[in-house]
Image (cartoon, rainbow, N blue to C red):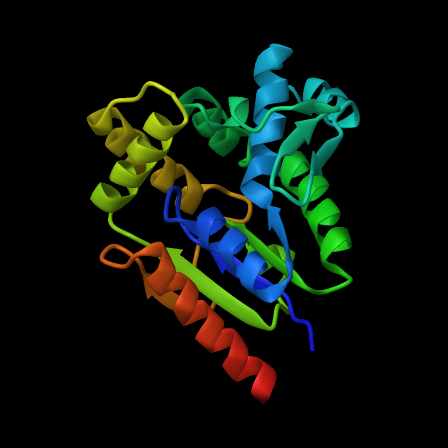
Amino acid sequence: MRINIAIDGPSASGKSTVARELCERLGYKHLDTGAMYRCVALKVVNDDIDINKEKELKKCLRDIDIRIDDEGKVYLNGEDVSLRIRTDEISMMASNVSTKKIVREFLVKLQQKIAEEKGYVMDGRDIGTVVLPNAELKIYLTASVEARAKRRYLENKEKGLNSDLQTLKNEIIARDYQDTHRKYSPLRQAPDAILIDSSEMSKADVVEEVMRLAAEYCQE
């Protein structure tokens, strides 16, 4: 039986990394919802859109086509933007655009449509609470600010992106506040989600734990 797995949690907690590995192991498809918000953010920055003007934002959304292939590459209007959407500037803008109801409604409908066929691991900020409230398995993956900043720093270094560890810590704290205090679909743990704190865990440890939980569900 194929199920949907929802993984929520704060920025840089390892959601996408774990989700991709789970998909490899289970033969599922990964939908990185954070990448979708980042695509909107990149379009906003590129077109100099004022996100506080709904008319401009509506036009921006009408002109957006987002696609994520089986290898995890992200395409915005046919262009591979996998690296460009991972900069610190786009991260913060993604947090800003995600506070806009019109953006959330646009992307939530798209995400729900995609997941109808089951067999998806979907990660983001409101998957278990808003996008897939009926997901069979819900995980809330978190970690300390220090652990998350270090991970993001190492990821950026590996990708050739310049970053400063203290700046990353400050940005993560700021984004946590934005994500948990936004008016629409704030980041929170769903009542039936299982909490995993990965501060002292390796990616392999987290993946094994979720695999165990998924196996338990499928055996019920």
Q: Residue at x 28, y 29 (%)?
A: 168
- Vertical arrangement, residue 40 with respect to residue 197, above or below: above
Q: Residue at x 49, y 48 (%)?
A: 16
Observer-nearest residue: 174 or 88? Answer: 88
- Vertical arrangement, residue 196 with respect to residue 72, above or below: below
Give how far across and how far down residue 189 sits, in percent: 43, 61
- Vertical arrangement, residue 23 with respect to residue 90, above or below: below
The C terminus lies in quadrant = bottom right
Q: Residue at x 25, y 25 (%)?
A: 167
Give how far across and how far down residue 128 sits, in percent: 55, 61
Quadrant of residue 166 in the image?
Answer: top left
- Vertical arrangement, residue 189 with respect to residue 125, above or below: below
* Residue 11 falls left or right of residue 66: left
Observer-nearest residue: 66 or 157? Answer: 157
The N terminus lies in quadrant = bottom right
Observer-nearest residue: 185 or 82? Answer: 82
The answer, for residue 194, to whether it is visible in the render is no
* Residue 211 falls left or right of residue 117: left
Observer-nearest residue: 103 or 196? Answer: 196
* Residue 96 falls left or right of residue 130: left
